[in-house]
Image (cartoon, helix red, strand yellow):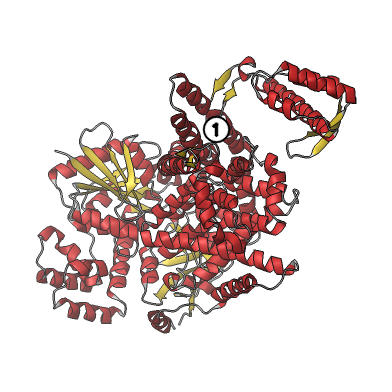
Amino acid sequence: MSIKIALAGNPNSGKTTLFNALTGSNQFIGNWPGVTVEKKEGKLKGYKDVKIMDLPGIYSLSPYSLEEVISRNYLLNEQTDCILNIVDGSNLERNLFLTAQLLELGIPVVVAVNMMDVVDKSGDVINIQELSTHLGCPVIPISALKGTGIQDAVKAALNAAEKLTIPSPLMKLSGKVEAALASIVSMIDAPSFIKRFYAVKIFERDSKFVETYKAPSGAEAIIASVEKEFDDDSESIITTDRYRAISKLIGSVLKKKKSVGLSISDKIDRVVTNRFLALPIFAVVIFIIYFVSVTTVGTWVTDWTNDGLFGDGWHLTGGEAYEAAVGDYEGEGAKVEAYLAAADKAGIDTAGISETLEAEEPNEEVVSGFIKEASAANLTAETEIKDEDGNVTETLPVSLADFETALAAEEPAPEEFGVWVPGISALAASGLGAIGTSEWLSGLVVDGIIAGVGAVIGFVPQMLVLFLFLAALEACGYMARIAFILDRIFRRFGLSGKSFIPMLVGTGCGIPGVMASRTIENEKERRMTVMITTFMPCGAKLPVIALISGAVFGGVWWVAPSAYFLGVFSVVISGLMLKKMRMFASDPSPFLMELPAYHVPTVENVLRSMWERGWSFIKKAGTLILISAILIWFLSSFGFTEGGFGMVEDLSQGLLANIGGAIAWIFAPLGFGTWDATVATITGLIAKENVVGTMGVLYGVAEVSENGEEVWATFASHFTLLSAYTFLVFNLYCPPCFAAMGAIKREMNNTKWFLFAIGYQILFAYLLALIIFQLGSLIGGGAFTVGSFFGFAALIFIIFMVARPKFRKPTQLRDVSQTV
Amino acid sequence: MERVIPLLLVRPGYMSVIKKIGGMDEMKKRLETMGLVIGSSVTVFSEFEGNLIIGVKDSRLGISMETAGRIMVCEGRPCAEIASK
């Protein structure tokens, strides 16, 4: 016989720690059907057929939050054999409120009083025996953190499940309420063990409950008379009365040591939420996290993943010597090029030598012929040494002798320098070559799948570092304070203080950013956050910014900051516009959040939480990105040529180029209506840094560096300053990569909302780029055209959407009048 | 008779007793669920930009000023433990 135990308790009661202790690694994490609330199930360690269901952390069984409704439906409709109710011993009174409700469900209950170590240390004494008598169910003291008492609780739960001992609490509500409940009980027809629960729900006029169970006709009169007597609504009467009963109970079971001043946690709060220090402290914490995870540790690991694991390979030892050798070799190559260029200028034909140098075995005759001609002309040249950012640091003269030495230079082989581990991409390429795979298949695997998926997986290490910090912040209790501090600021544009975290994560990668929006309870605020989180420039957008600012703007300082500024601006403007729309219109949900006491988190919990988030990121990248990578690869490597349909030499002949050409007109009002810019935008949907790679392919450079330095000159010739900037703007703020869109779809959990979000992002990016291009052209001295008209129209439209009065539901007006 | 004022006006370090919570909506129910019921005592710990950190039962809650304005309490008295700091 299999047994199902439901784990229920308040948030911050140590439920997750207990669940991990009970199930170990036997966990299955999913979603409750139809909602984005996490569902965790596990098998009890050491028992074959005992399932543990971890219910969401809740304060009560009322119908006001998704978590409460889910827990309630689960307990009422699924055959649960026992409820293991974990309560925080250091906050007994509030925690017992949920317990009191659970005791009425007609299901065996075992109460585990957690944090007994903390209680003992503070000098308080809980009379467990007395508590058990009053609650009418077994009560077990435990410490989930220290691992004490857990087995006793398990045994008690299994015992209660087997014997089916329904709790019989002594706790009673006040006389008049009990009398009213008793008369409702006599009116209803239900199994006797659940009658009281039904009666309470009918008395409370619980909206969700009354939908499925019709209240008896006589009940309303009874409820109304009690309400009149207490001058309050029936639900509040029950709540207040429950707390009164619990207070009385607490008086007899809890002996509190006289408290001495502020607790450590309160003292920390005095500093951390101090009116002057709160924001500076917050800024420092965020800066450290961002700095470590995105710029230092994260970047090292990400570079290794991209260039090593998914690239050619990496050095275990001897890496520096190899780097130096490569640098030397590139320097020699530059000398050859410079010399050839000079020869070209001097009127010497270089076509022949250039061609033969490309070949594996250069034709010696051609080379010596060229050298003779050059020596006759007494030709010298100059080469420029550039640093990483492409700035010229040195100019070297190149004589004929230098040229000859340079020609003789050989490319260093990485294997010769220390221990070299080939990357997946290199391995796959050589492996597929060895077994004689056809060209297209090897292209699909190496360029399509490995390159596409690798580009996204490359962010995993960086994300894990970021998740590690976030998990630690969450576990220690500071995250709740961040939400508290930022609430006032974010409220102004329709978001909550909790919207900050998704946006912070989004500057690393949009996928986990969107997923992080889950902690926002209010559905409207959560949807809005999901929609606008990806406006923050993520890590993959940085190469695109670098390309534009380097190629077209000559590396001026303001392009990159302006991208971030426009990102924040987009978030704010979108917030202001969206909160006035009918679908988002509601009274801003006032802030109400428990601030758990600060404590040192356990390593296991932090690592587990980091891994859970990281894993769902990997799963996302592994599925959606795989499919879209294959699709884009196919579209770009196949096309119609003279020989019919087949694989094409380069991107410009592929199907994608045809598609790009067909829809390029759409972008004409934004200034970049060319097929190549359109194709780059499309490939950017796989991963934004593909924009740079695509430009490289289209402009005929096989391999481009991170910032695309090699294509700068060609790129600049295809764009004006203004059109390059609008190209950047559109690519940064239009819907992100497919994987992030997948995350948006999942979090929205609704196709209509998903389409609305994507549609909004496209429209917003388009209008923003339109305004910038059209108004920019006018300011730059252009004539007033139809385009300028639409530019102004878009600007006025956005201003109107921001400034128009808020949409109000008529019912809200009534609410207001009631409070006054 | 003691004066009844919104919790919003209670200064940090003061303790007061809840007399009534205005309105009939979900927020009222949520507050009650968290232990803010008639007769329970509330201590204001600190204030940030109008939002309050309050102590109810043995927990700390962050609440916005709009919410604090609806919680009517009898005028607070200094809570010795906190005010002395």
On screen, residue A93 versus residue A450, left or right, reads left
Q: Where is residue A595 in the image (x, y as percent from the top left)?
A: 48, 56
Q: How crowded is mark 1: few (under 14 residues within 10 Å), some or many (20 or more)?
A: many
Q: Which of A684 and A145 is in front in this view?
A: A684
**Quarter that holds the C terminus of chain A:** bottom left
Element type where label 1 sits in the image:
helix
Q: Where is residue A198 in the image (x, y as percent from the top left)?
A: 18, 65
Q: Nearer the viewer, residue B27 or A181?
A: B27
- What residue is shown with label 1? A305
Q: What residue type is labelled 1?
A: Thr
A249 to A428, vertically: above or below: below
On screen, residue B70 versus residue A33, left or right, reads right
User: Which residue is depicted at the point 43% across and 31% down?
Assistant: A441
A757 to A78, vertically: above or below: below
On screen, residue A580 versus residue A284, left or right, reads left
* Disc 1 chain ID: A
On screen, residue A367 versus residue A107, left or right, reads right
User: Which residue is depicted at the point 27% across and 45% down?
Assistant: A53
Picture quadrant where residue A115 is located: top left
Q: Position of residue A605 (x, y in %)?
A: 43, 40
